[in-house]
Amino acid sequence: MRSALPASALALLLGAALADPATAQHRRREDRFRNDGRIEAEAPAALRPSAAVTEAVTGFDNLTNGYLEQGPPFEELDEDSVVALRSFNDNRFIFEEVELAEDGLGPTYNAQSCRECHQNVATGGASQVAEHRTGRLERETFFESLGGSLIQSRAISPDIVERVAYQDDIRTFRISTNTLGAGYVEAIANSTLQAIRERQPFGMRGTIVLAPVLEAGGKARIGRFGWKGQHASLVSFSGDAYLNEMGITSPLLPDENTSSGVFVGYGTEWDLVPDPEDDGVDLIAFADFMRSTKAPARGPITPDVEAGERWFREVGCVTCHTAAIVTAPPGTVINGGEFVVPDALGNKLIHPYSDFLLHDIGTGDGIPLLPTAELAGTASQLRTAPLWALRTRNRLMHDGLSFTKQEAIGRHRGQAAGVTARYQLLSRTQRQQLLAFLDSL
């Protein structure tokens, strides 16, 4: 039997742990990613469009969907004339703005602007940029790398560049996701995502992730952003990316990342900017920009594309790649009370080809959403990749390591094994038509 530690010894151990800035930061960050466990329906489930529903605005043209006004000519904006939150173009400028060390960049980071990872055809699109995650299993328990599973690829000094530990043999890439049309996704009511799940066959039913809305003090909402569905609001999503991809702290996430577990934040030679390094305005600018983007537009609809869509449905791809979703009505309060769905985003029919739930299709990267017993199952699961804007991508799946649609389809196993088998039974002509359909997305 293990003997209990005396209270005095326990206090000394706890004090030592809390005295380590890196340990204390890690604990605070884990606390921030806890949710209250209760979700609200937000609005009645909307699985079929009503007379009040209209198609979402689409395009790859850097023009607003109507949530914000377009604003002054983008080409005329500079650091002296830009006004955060004023317009689509102002917020786009901030989304594209390059951060420097004096702004709080790093000390470890992956990119210097949102645009670095989210630009293809238009600002906000996907890209080939991938982040690197690692960890290891010990007696069936997942352990993150020192400093967390995310290995930042860049740093402001060669002395603090993160490296992969040899013993961390679970290693993966996660490619940057498309954010065009993200405002519509945010405006999907919890009840609608729940209803989509309930309609799925038991063996293919997705997993709902309860994500904390950071700006609402951790109130729970169904996650829909990120490869693990780890965020439910665009402000939370922005705060996470600002910290983890650019190393800039904010009121939502005020603690700096470490370098492989070593504290490199404010007070060290590598970080001269007090935390939080941003006052939170940039997070709203990023979120409002994404809320204002149009949904990705379809390509030409030919007879082969129409036939291919039929095969896509018949083999069962739409079980997870949901073809049509209706957003909550205007005036609906979402994000734990922090956002009201506006006219530009409410009662809109979108075609993301995703259920925004987690599934195990045999490609799980082995890294759970958080290293806790409750979330251990997410190690083998990933969010259904939305297929809108698929034609703008040439690196597919979560890791970007599939280079053709045929290869990506072939990797679908697990919960998708039956669908893949039915695809293989299609004639050559039918498969070509289905691929033509995918090329139209």
Image (cartoon, rainbow, N blue to C red):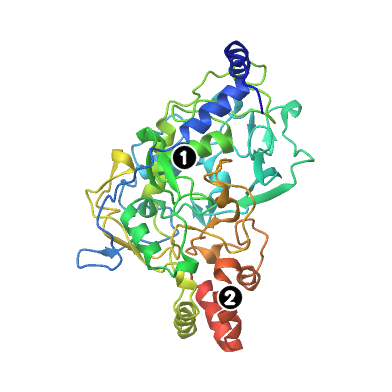
* Dot 2 and dot 1 residues touching (CB under 8 Å): no
Query: Which residue lies at the image location 29% right of the left edge and 60% below the top edge?
Result: 348
What residue is drawn where x is 66% and y is 21%? Answer: 270
217 is higher (above) or lower (below) than 136: above
Quadrant of res 406:
bottom right
Q: Amino acid at mark 1?
A: Ser
Where is residue 198 drawn, in percent x and y? 37, 64
Tag on residue 420?
2
Residue 351 image point, x, y percent? 40, 65
Question: Residue shown at 59%/14% (left/top)?
Answer: 15
Q: Can you identify the residue that label 1 sits on? A: 238
Disc 2 versus disc 1: nearer the observer: 2
Q: Quadrant of the N terminus?
A: top right
What residue is rendered at 75% in x and 29% in y?
158
Is 334 on the left or on the right of 151, as rendered?
Answer: left
Q: How far from the left and from the top, in percent, is residue 137?
A: 70, 45
Q: Residue 203 appears at what percent x and percent y?
A: 49, 68
- Relative placement, left or right, of 83 versus 173 is left
**Which class describes the residues within 10 Å of circle 1: few (<14), some (14-19), or many (20+)?**
many
Say left or right for 25 vs 327. right
Of pointers 2 and 1, the one earlier in the residue sequence: 1
| SS at mark 1 in the image | helix
Residue farthest toward the left in the current orientation of the protein? 51
Q: Amino acid at mark 2?
A: Thr
Instruction: Determine crowd level at label 2: few under 14, some 14-19, many 20+ residues with C-alpha closer than 10 A.
Output: some
In this rendered view, identify the residue nearer to me: 183 or 420.
Answer: 420
Q: Nearer the viewer, residue 195 or 260?
A: 195
Residue at the far right in the pictured view: 166
Q: Secondary structure at mark 2?
A: helix
